Image: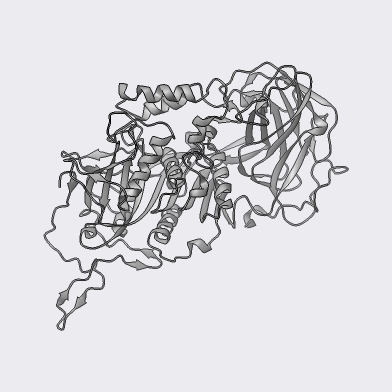
């Protein structure tokens, strides 16, 4: 069948190790061959199927939409690799990596792209998923997102086209959608169980989130890595923009390497609807919200979720996983999470051996129903330092409590109620300038620093800034930075995202001349620095009550402005000082112009609440004479970090 390519026949058909359970007649001669089966040992599937002889093929799945308005439903290119035994009665589940990057930036640390043979069939599948999982009885599908590479249509950066193309592939695997070969003849997925997983980093993981939130049947699990859960949150925080106008359209054009006039109307519509001029949340962003959206909603999720994110990811910022994670928990979705200290990095490149092993067990559990105990293990793996990973029952740490720290007129930061006021001017200032020596006056920021910490203090979760402010203009951007002032060796996520790529390789799976399973190893970058910005958060003050309907402040009158920073996992070391920086427009991450407003902060009604993990002993924070904990119960000293669970 055109579009479907079969492997070469092997000279020897001795597949006895693969055809498990074959019945033998008297004398040891097989009287009949049973259907091929997977092999399970030590709780996981074993590599008993030939990668070299696997079936490599492609189809075009028909979606439900016509985004390029050519009168035909968009078709989605699907490149498939599966064990040859799946044509001999073996029914296999499916691992899908849907991506817009297969012909532009590539996938993984080594930027692998798809490679095709002379007939247009798939010759190389990026990443290790095919090499590792096909021999263990899985099919692997590399799917071109609508509007990219060999798929039809126009992508729309998180909207209907992005989501419904992937959903159509799941529907085809379960007999609910049509697919065609290159000659237009229909193709059915007779070789699959219908059970599917979606996995991927960044945009790929975003597609997994979006498709899962449609509630499509047959998608059993997703593994979103550094993935978006709300495109508004990717572009903005509380009315403050991260990128210049029309970034959504720029990204749509970047991933469509054959961009032409057919998609001009789609992109003009995106520009008209995204509301860049205000920074507000509107129906455009509602369609692209997978937690509470018009197209996808977390309440519809049927799949289990294994999320991975890094707290220093300032591309897809960590509030994507924290808000998604919280919503999944409220819906009772089975889930697991890894939280690292890097920037925008895949776990294959910061914890490789553990990642491959854990991912294998996860897929075996959810796609083959192998009860290997992974769901009985601690739900969260959390990195606290360059070589320090712990496990805990959930995230954030269940024993974390809110520590309300209050700015003082003398520049201190402790648990007592402050007094007086302080004023700064909203200007565009870099973070390096904002966190520089907090004892030096700066007209564009306020700086408050605690006394040296009496013990290690671990932040686990999302700090909340709560300020009472008065402006001399209708609005101002506000920035809150939580800072660790103290010399320490930390993961250097600012340098090459936190990893250095070596020349030595490690191999995971089987290889062919066209597609090997070996990838360069990496090591964690570390740096000794005098401080670290631990948490960041921004808000346009007029969006304090609503992201959709701004309320300008009345100049000269106070208003309470409360917002969350990005989440974190971090240990402040004994003897370090915990700092709070309050400022206007953060030039390092905000695209907005500063308003130039004079911002007066009422210190008596302002604080930042930091979720901290505590243990045994009484914790007196800051000035010993007046800063004992005044909340419910006492605050205890943290346990030693190495023993945290």
Q: Residue furthest bottom?
A: 26
Tell me if I can see residue 91 in this picture.
yes
On the image, the x and y values in percent for residue 243 come to 51, 25
- At x 83%, y 47%, the residue is 630
Above or below, 171 against 478 in this view is: below
Give whichever of 618, 245 is nearer the camera: 245
Task: Answer left or right for 528 relative to 561.
Answer: left
Instruction: Please state if 228 lies on the left or on the right of 162 as rendered.
Output: right
Residue drawn 83% across the image and 46% down it: 628
In the image, is 485 to the left or to the right of 172?
right
For the view shown, which residue lies furthest in the front direction? 71
In-front residue for pair 555/565: 555
Q: Quadrant of residue 446?
A: top right
Residue 122, image x, y percentages: 23, 43
> What is the x, y in percent for residue 209?
46, 44
**Residue in front for this viewpoint, 80 or 522:** 80
Residue 452 in view here: no
Q: Quadrant of residue 591?
A: top right
Determine whether 457 is above or below 269 in the image: below
Query: Looking at the figure, which quarter contains the C terminus?
Result: bottom right
Location of residue 539 in the rendering, given as x and y in whole percent from the top left corner? 64, 29
- Which residue is painted at 19% across and 71% down in the image? 33
């Amino acid at each position: 069948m055109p579009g479907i390519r079969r492997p070469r026949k092997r000279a020897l058909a001795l597949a006895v190790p693969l055809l498990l359970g074959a019945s033998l007649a008297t004398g040891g001669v097989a009287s009949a061959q049973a259907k091929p089966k997977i092999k399970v040992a030590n709780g996981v599937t074993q590599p008993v199927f030939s990668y070299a002889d696997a079936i490599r093929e492609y189809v075009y799945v028909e979606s439900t939409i016509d985004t390029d308005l050519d009168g035909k439903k968009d078709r989605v290119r699907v490149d498939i690799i599966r064990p040859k035994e799946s044509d001999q009665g073996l029914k296999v589940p499916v691992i899908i990596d849907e991506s817009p990057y297969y012909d532009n930036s590539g996938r993984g640390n080594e930027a692998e792209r798809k490679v095709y043979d002379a007939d247009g069939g798939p010759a190389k599948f990026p990443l290790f998923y095919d090499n590792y999982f096909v021999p263990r009885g899985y099919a692997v599908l590399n799917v071109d997102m609508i509007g990219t590479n060999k798929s039809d249509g126009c992508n729309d950066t998180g909207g209907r086209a992005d989501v419904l193309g992937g959903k159509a592939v799941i529907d085809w695997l379960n007999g609910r959608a049509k697919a065609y070969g290159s000659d237009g003849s229909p193709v059915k997925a007779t070789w699959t169980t219908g059970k599917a997983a979606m996995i991927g980093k960044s945009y790929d993981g975003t597609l997994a989130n979006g498709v899962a939130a449609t509630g499509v049947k047959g998608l059993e699990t997703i593994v979103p890595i550094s993935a978006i859960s709300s495109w508004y949150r990717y572009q903005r925080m509380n009315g403050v923009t991260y990128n210049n106008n029309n970034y959504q359209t720029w990204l749509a054009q970047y991933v469509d390497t054959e961009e032409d006039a057919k998609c001009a109307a789609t992109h003009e519509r995106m520009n008209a609807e995204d509301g860049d001029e205000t920074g507000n949340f509107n129906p455009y962003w509602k369609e692209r919200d997978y937690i509470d959206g018009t197209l996808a909603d977390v309440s519809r999720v049927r799949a289990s979720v294994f999320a991975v994110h890094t707290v220093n990811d300032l591309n897809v910022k960590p509030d994507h996983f924290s808000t998604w994670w919280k919503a999944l928990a409220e819906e009772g979705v089975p889930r697991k999470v890894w939280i690292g200290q890097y920037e925008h990095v895949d776990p294959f490149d910061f914890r490789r051996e553990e990642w491959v092993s854990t991912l294998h067990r996860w897929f075996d559990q959810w796609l083959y129903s192998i009860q290997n105990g992974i769901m009985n293990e601690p739900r969260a793996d959390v990195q606290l330092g360059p070589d320090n990973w712990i496990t805990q029952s959930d995230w954030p740490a269940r024993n974390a409590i809110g520590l309300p720290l209050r700015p003082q007129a003398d520049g201190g930061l402790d648990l007592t109620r402050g007094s007086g006021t302080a004023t700064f001017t909203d200007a565009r200032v870099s973070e390096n300038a904002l966190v520089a020596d907090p004892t030096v006056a700066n007209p564009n920021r306020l700086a408050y620093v605690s006394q040296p910490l009496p013990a290690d203090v671990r932040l686990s979760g999302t700090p909340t800034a709560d300020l009472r402010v008065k402006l001399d203009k209708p609005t101002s951007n506000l920035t809150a930075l939580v800072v660790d002032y103290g010399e320490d060796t930390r993961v250097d996520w600012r340098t090459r995202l936190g990893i250095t790529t070596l020349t030595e390789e490690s191999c995971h799976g089987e290889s062919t001349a066209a597609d090997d399973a070996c990838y360069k190893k990496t090591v964690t970058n570390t740096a000794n620095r005098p401080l670290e910005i631990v948490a960041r958060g921004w808000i346009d003050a007029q969006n304090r009550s609503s992201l959709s309907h701004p309320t300008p402040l009345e100049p000269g009158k106070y208003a309470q402005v409360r917002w969350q920073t990005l989440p974190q996992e971090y240990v402040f070391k004994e003897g370090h000082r915990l700092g709070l920086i309050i400022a206007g427009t953060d030039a390092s991450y905000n695209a907005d112009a500063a308003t130039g407003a004079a911002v007066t902060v009422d210190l008596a009604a302002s604080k930042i609440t930091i979720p901290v993990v505590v243990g045994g002993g009484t914790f007196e924070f800051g000035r010993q004479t007046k800063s004992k904990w005044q909340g419910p119960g006492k605050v205890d000293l943290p346990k030693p970090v190495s023993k945290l669970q």
